């Protein structure tokens, strides 16, 4: 069965430092991978996706993610964190064989950027 | 343009009552999804609508849950005889089917509290 794991409930980083939010997945075939961010009392906002092509994907707000097929990972990164990046981040996968395109989400990682 | 809207934003109901949650997708988006976000957990898929096709109901947790989509646009999620474990944020998302964009656009959610 398809699944997504976000091993860290929370990541703490100082403003200006690089950040990484980890995600690993399990899916048959080639996955479609996504990152979403959720600010308090708001819905999820799309950050970036990997479908095919270059393993390094760039997205909104300076975020990027690297697809690593051998490690089945899709970690989210940013070179220099901002306090405003503090939010809940979700990794998601879509099984390319699933015609509904529904997303399987990880449990989320709370990012806290301290000034 | 307008995003996905959901109403009400908050709903408090007594155990055993029925509730209806509404979703207005982005205009022109033929694919519509409902997800549930329980406290401390990720999002779980509930149901998927695509055009006039039969919905994918594989994620509905019990027969107390049902959903419909009228005219290919607005959708209503109904929970009958609510239970305390139904307390969660219910998120609706839509997608422009027939494109290679794949990403889903989420509404702000309805926070349901069953007392």
Image (cartoon, coloured by chain):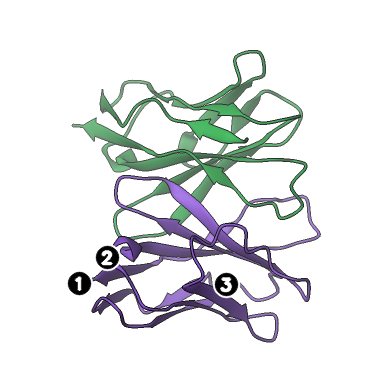
Chain colours: A green, B purple
Residue that lies at the very extreme toward the top in this rendered image = A70
Residue A9's image quarter?
top left
Image coords of residue B19 (percent x, y): 38, 81
Query: Residue drawn at (37%, 21%), measured in percent from left and top?
Result: A18
Disc 1 crowd rating (10 Å Cα; few below 14, some 14-19, many 20+) is few
Q: What residue does disc 2 label?
A: B84
- Front-most of residues B18 and B34: B18
- Please tell me whether mark 1 sits on a helix, a strand or a loop: loop
Mark 1–mark 2 distance (CA, rounded to whole Å) = 6 Å
Q: Is residue B92 above or below residue A53?
A: below
Quote the CA–CA distance across marks 1 and 3: 37 Å
As displayed, is residue B15 above or below residue A109? below
- The residue at 31%/21% (across/down) is A17
Q: Position of residue A5 (x, y in %)?
A: 47, 30
Dot 1 falls on which chain? B
Kindly indicate the quadrant of the structure image that contains residue B16.
bottom left
Q: Nearer the viewer, residue B67 or A19?
A: B67
Check disc 3: other Cα within 10 Å, few if <14, some if 14-19, many if 20+: few
* Coordinates of residue B67 in the picture (x, y in percent): 56, 76
Measured from the top left, where is residue B26 in percent x and y?
Answer: 60, 72
Please tell me which residue is depicted at 78% across the width and 42% down the height of the picture.
A97
Q: Mark 1 or 2 closer to N-term?
A: 2
Query: As drawn, is A22 to the left or to the right of B46?
Result: left
Name the residue that disc number 3 marks: B1
Q: Quadrant of the N terminus of chain B?
A: bottom right
């Amino acid at each position: 069965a398809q699944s997504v794991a976000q091993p860290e409930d929370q990541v703490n980083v100082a403003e200006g430092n690089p950040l990484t939010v980890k995600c690993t997945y399990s899916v048959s075939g080639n996955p479609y991978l996504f990152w979403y961010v959720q600010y308090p009392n708001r819905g999820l906002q799309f950050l970036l996706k990997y479908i095919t092509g270059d393993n390094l994907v760039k997205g909104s707000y300076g975020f990027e993610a690297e697809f690593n097929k051998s490690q089945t990972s899709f970690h989210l990164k940013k070179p220099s964190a901002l306090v405003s990046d503090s939010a809940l981040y979700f990794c998601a996968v879509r099984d390319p064989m699933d015609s509904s395109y529904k997303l399987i989400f990880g449990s989320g990682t709370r990012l806290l950027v301290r000034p | 343009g307008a995003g996905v809207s959901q109403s009400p934003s908050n709903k408090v109901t007594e155990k055993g009552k029925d509730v209806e949650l509404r979703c207005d997708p982005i205009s022109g988006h033929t694919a519509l999804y409902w997800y549930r976000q329980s406290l401390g957990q990720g999002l779980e898929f509930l149901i998927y609508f695509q055009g006039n096709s039969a919905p994918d109901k594989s994620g509905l947790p019990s027969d107390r849950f049902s959903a419909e989509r009228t005219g290919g646009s607005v959708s209503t999620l109904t929970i009958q005889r609510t239970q305390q474990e139904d307390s969660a944020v219910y998120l609706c998302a839509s997608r422009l089917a027939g494109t290679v964009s794949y990403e889903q656009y989420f509404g702000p959610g309805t926070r349901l509290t069953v007392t």
